[in-house]
Amino acid sequence: MPPKSRRSGRTKQESQRLRAALANPVPAGGVGLRVTDAPGYPLAVNPSEYNCSLLAAQLADEWVEYVAATGMTVQAKVYAQAVNRFCEYVDTHQGKAAAKASLADSDLFKSLVGWELSLPEEYAEGSTRPRLVSGALRTLIVRRDDHRERHVAPELARLARGPALIDWGETTERDEFTRKEKRALVRAAWQSVHATRTRLRDGWALADQGRHPAEGSWTSIADLLRGLSRDEITPDDIRRNLPLPRHWPAELLAFAAGDGILVPNNARFQLCCKLFLQLYPATRDLHAFRVLLMDATGHASEEVTSFGESEVEFLPKGVRLTLRKNRAGLLRHRAFRDRPASDAPAPEDGNIIVNWPRREASEVVRQLLEVTERVRAKAPHVTDTLFVSACVRGSFTAVFGRWNPQASASFGRWLDAVGVEIAGDRNIGRMRKSVKVEKAIVSEGRISAAADDHTEETFAGHYAQGTTLRIMSGRTITTAQQHWLDQALARVDGPTVIAPGDDEDTGRDQLQEAGLSRDEAEAIMTGQLDMGVSHCRNPYESPFSSPGELCAVAPLRCLECRNAWILPSNLPQLLLFEDHLKRLRTRLAPPVFTRFWGQSWVNLRAVIADRTDEEKIQARKHIDAGEAVLDLPLNANTEFDA
């Protein structure tokens, strides 16, 4: 194991990372660090701001060491938030006694429990944030308890190591873009890329036509572009040398205003921003490249924006990229092949977009390299991404560096700029889900194929919850159910019932219309095929006996046989058979009766239920008069002999 310092108990590597984390200035009396993934965004815990300064210092020390040891970036703010909120709670609820609060004091137990239980009150119902914040504080307490030279009260340690007092809450998965929305996004992205390249090409061409503003004019667009493009002047030089806006030529006024309104007090700054837009890509321009790369590769936003020029390898028919996924700590090398030219659909009428609508990662990367080439040359310190942009700050200072798609340059603002309407959350993460849905469709629902860059469990729990796949799953289930329902309806395992007619000829016609031949219909109507409770189409084709043998189970199983035909004249025998089954139900256990007679009972009840009360009364009169009898074989009662 790496050697540890005797004084701090930290390894040499941890000490180096801790010193690097604390290299930036922090508030006086505070303990803090600068998050490396968000330049210029400091995080700090200042113990002097709290009455419980000792407790705050203990937790802050653990926080800084934990961040330095793990190398976490933006996640560090959750731990800082947990420390600050807990200290605020202790100050509020303990008053003056908070000055003595310490992790070594068991009296802090009630405060820790009360704070954790109160967290859900500060967030929306179902939020997962309370559990995340409480878990962060528990981690710091456990880490301190694990240190041999740092004392933690046993009650606090047991609580921190025990089960959480609050639930995780519920998360609402973002839905994917609809197919129409995704097509509109890709089309708008290609149009935006084409517009950006055209703007930069025209801007540099105009700059080549100008002269140094000192030799030409400070109100000439070409001269200003020439000076900025060759680093001969700065935005601050433009601010100092430009005359008042009322003395500008009309061409310069229109250029500075663009599609908006020129504000006299801010005119110089607006002009500098417009000049930079003619020479370098802005943050908003890069959203289009991110959309196209996510569409072409199927990878997450953080992956397609996290590879530098040295991590791009062009292949004869494609490109190989090195993709980083910070959340999962993954580094992957993926090759993306170009599609054959014949597979690329022809451009739609009216579209003059270069390479539209090809979905080739290599083409997108080539154009991204071209667009950002000059910015990368001025920002050599940024080597881990191609997503770099240039802008002018309010102090008239030119800034070249990595893009930061937030606030005024957000994805939502880009959607507004390109005129794409999106229903629901305007989050770029939905693009990845859309691509995943397409993979699932192409792979015919095979999760192993769709979940090609993460686990199948992640796909099933995170990506398979979208509307499209849910609808597809529902249609698949409905189709399967309909298939088996149709099979069940096509397979007749019960008798065919002939409705009562006005005369005998009507009965013959119904039998023939139902599929019987004239001879079979005549035999049934004349009683030649009477089996007791029904007539039989062919007693020698019984499903209960071997082919060619006379049916051995009639009339006990006639109500379960597809050869049985029940005529209106069979109603008295059916009523007698019903009486017989009712007696069996009283003598047999329900499971036994259902196993032997369940289907016959259900079919019999359905047949009798279709007859009117008058018909049943008339049939009972025939029975009482002795005109109807039910002949059952002797074995119909042998199962009850004990």
Image (spheres, grey):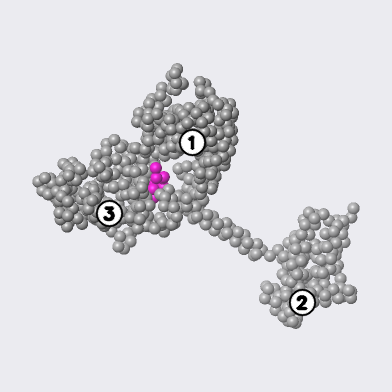
Q: Amino acid at mark 1?
A: Glu
Q: Dot 3 lies on which element? A: helix
Number of other residues with Cα within 10 Å of mark 1, as a class: few under 14, some 14 to 19, many 20 or more: some
Vertical side of 163 occupied by 183: above or below: below
Q: Percent x, y for residue 340?
A: 35, 52
- Residue at image mark 1: 88
Between disc 2 and disc 1, whose residue precedes? Answer: 1
Query: The residue under label 2 is which amino acid type?
Result: Met
* Tag 2 and tag 1, C-beta contact below 8 Å: no
Report which quarter residue 31 is drawn in.
top left
Q: Between disc 1 and disc 3, whose residue precedes?
A: 1
Q: Nearer the viewer, residue 201 or 130?
A: 130
Residue 384 in the image: above or below residue 16: below
Using the rendered image of the protein, determine whether residue 104 is visible from the camera's viewpoint: yes
The region drawn magenta spans 294-302
Residue annotated with mark 2 = 525
Residue 297 percent location from the top left of the image: 39, 47
